[in-house]
Amino acid sequence: MQTIRRIKTSSSGTTERAGRDPGRDLLPLLGGAATVVAVVGAVLALADVDSPLRAPFTLFFLLAAPSTAIAAALRGLEPFGRLLVSVAGAVAVNMLVAQGMLALHQWSTPGGIVAVTAISTLTLLLVLVRHLRGRTAGRRAS
């Protein structure tokens, strides 16, 4: 069922939704921009494109992908603690992937990107399964 929100016009002539902070719409926009930057970084690294944006965008991907997955798993923490733990966990994941690949003499940049992507995706999927399983268990108990 869809609800209809009232739109009010301020004295300056701009319209805004009632009860919403106009700055709140900026968060999804920033999240989408960060996702685009991370995906572009991964694609540039995997395609071995010679670009000045390759290094910073790839580094952003290598930090953002695992930290997003870890932050999703830590929903109970306060925001600052969650941010700190997720970034530290992302650095740890990247170091463990690099150390494991070097120990096996299998180091390659695309391989590292794929390994970090796989670990991050697996973590996000496990969080999603845990969340959905908790939801169905709550429904059965009701």
Image: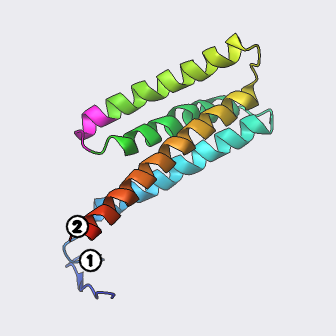
Which quadrant is home to the C terminus? bottom left
The answer to whether 80 is drawn above or below residue 7 in the figure is above
Name the residue at 19% across, 79% down. Answer: 11
Q: Which mark is residue 39?
A: none
The answer to whether 4 is drawn above or below residue 30 in the figure is below
32 magenta-colored = no
User: Mark 1 or 2, which is nearer the eye?
Assistant: 2
For disc 1, the marked residue is 17
**In this picture, which residue range is highlighted in magenta?**
76-82
Image spot of residue 44 (x, y percent) = 73, 39
How many numbered discs sit on the rendered protein? 2
Residue closer to the observer: 19 or 12:
19
Q: Residues within 10 Å of mark 2 (few under 14, many from 20)?
A: few
Left or right of 45? Residue 23 is left
For disc 2, the marked residue is 141
Image spot of residue 76 (x, y percent) = 24, 43
77 magenta-colored = yes
Name the residue at 42% across, 37% down. Answer: 70
Residue type of the residue flagged with mark 2 = Ala
Q: Residues within 10 Å of mark 1 (few under 14, many from 20)?
A: few
Residue type of the residue flagged with mark 1 = Arg
Left or right of 32? Residue 19 is left
